[in-house]
Amino acid sequence: MKGSSKRKFEVVEVGRVENDFLEEVPDDYHDKTSKMIVHDEYTDSLLGLEENSHIAVLCWLDRSDRKIQRVHPMADKSNPLTGVFSTRSPVRPNPISYTVCELLELDENVLHVNGLDMLNGTPVIDFKSYTTKYNIKSPRFPDWVPERDRNE
Amino acid sequence: MKGSSKRKFEVVEVGRVENDFLEEVPDDYHDKTSKMIVHDEYTDSLLGLEENSHIAVLCWLDRSDRKIQRVHPMADKSNPLTGVFSTRSPVRPNPISYTVCELLELDENVLHVNGLDMLNGTPVIDFKSYTTKYNIKSPRFPDWVPERDRNE
């Protein structure tokens, strides 16, 4: 897209992650609980949230490199160099994550969730009602995608 | 979270949607093709993308209201007033969409995709390899979620 200018937008933190993951996310994060503390001005947006067993959480990976465009997936040099858009690496031009979590409890502006793979202090920028409409039948993946992420 | 300051971040357009949806997204968008034109400086990030049958696309809904915090879901007044975080409404503090699309073809910096529910000209801010790891068994939804979005 030569000659066209890239537009830029301001994303705001709507909440923050609180958990014990200070340096890295443990392998068993699926079984670990985190809090999401929602900023006061967004509490009106929480009405009815507790009717969802699961939510899709988008965070801004504020400690990620935005310049790197190719990685060896799963940090394994035996995997082929791959464009970040073909991965779910935290390293990408806009370091936005997408994780589906179990919503355990909503206590005023504090969400207790299971399965959030984020470091303590990470900015939350959005979360949504989970939907099954994107459960694709028989998708095709790159060879390096591990078996645990291919199960249907 | 009283007294704490909200952090802000700059999100950049990595590409743009091109399709025939000028005013609204048609109901049968699942069967319609769109192009995603990736800006030249991000073409290195596309390496290996064609090995994915599906990708998860994040757009910045630049025509969405960011101030509204509660909506009647599905634009149906008979549905209860609901906080936007408990919906997938385009109206939200950070108007970021998440759609899983079929990747039909990658032609240099142009992706041809099926099933993108975005208006022509919408900024693309990220896309990722699709994963089945978030296919939740027996999730619980708010009552207003239509049957077509509950199927597993």
Image (cartoon, coloured by chain):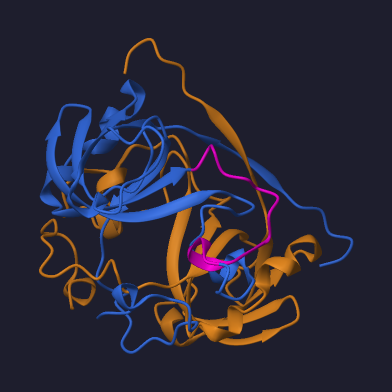
Chain colours: A blue, B orange
Front one among B67 and A137:
A137
- Asked whether, in this view, residue B132 is left or right of residue A141, the answer is left
Front one among A110 and A32:
A32
Front one among A151 and A126:
A151
- Asked whether, in this view, residue A76 is left or right of residue B70, the answer is right
Q: Position of residue A68 (x, y in %)?
A: 68, 54
Q: Is residue A44 above or below residue B80?
A: above
Displayed quadrant of residue B110: bottom right
Displayed quadrant of residue B132: bottom left
Q: Decide if residue A144 is in sight here.
A: yes
Q: The N terminus of chain A appears in which quarter of the rendering?
A: bottom right
Q: The C terminus of chain A appears in which quarter of the rendering?
A: bottom left
Identity of the residue furthest to the front in this view: A78
Identity of the residue furthest to the right in this view: A3
The question of residue A71 being in magenta is answered with yes
Q: Position of residue A47 (x, y in %)?
A: 19, 38
Q: What residue is shown at x 84% (from left), y 59% (from top)?
A: A4
Q: What's the magenta region?
A: A61-76
Front one among A122 and A107:
A122
Q: Position of residue A7 (x, y in %)?
A: 72, 49
Q: Position of residue A41 (x, y in %)?
A: 35, 23
Q: What residue is shown at x 33% (from left), y 82% (from top)?
A: A136
The question of residue A152 being in magenta is answered with no
Q: Decide if residue B24 is in sight here.
A: no
Q: What residue is shown at x 39% (from left), y 44% (from top)?
A: A126
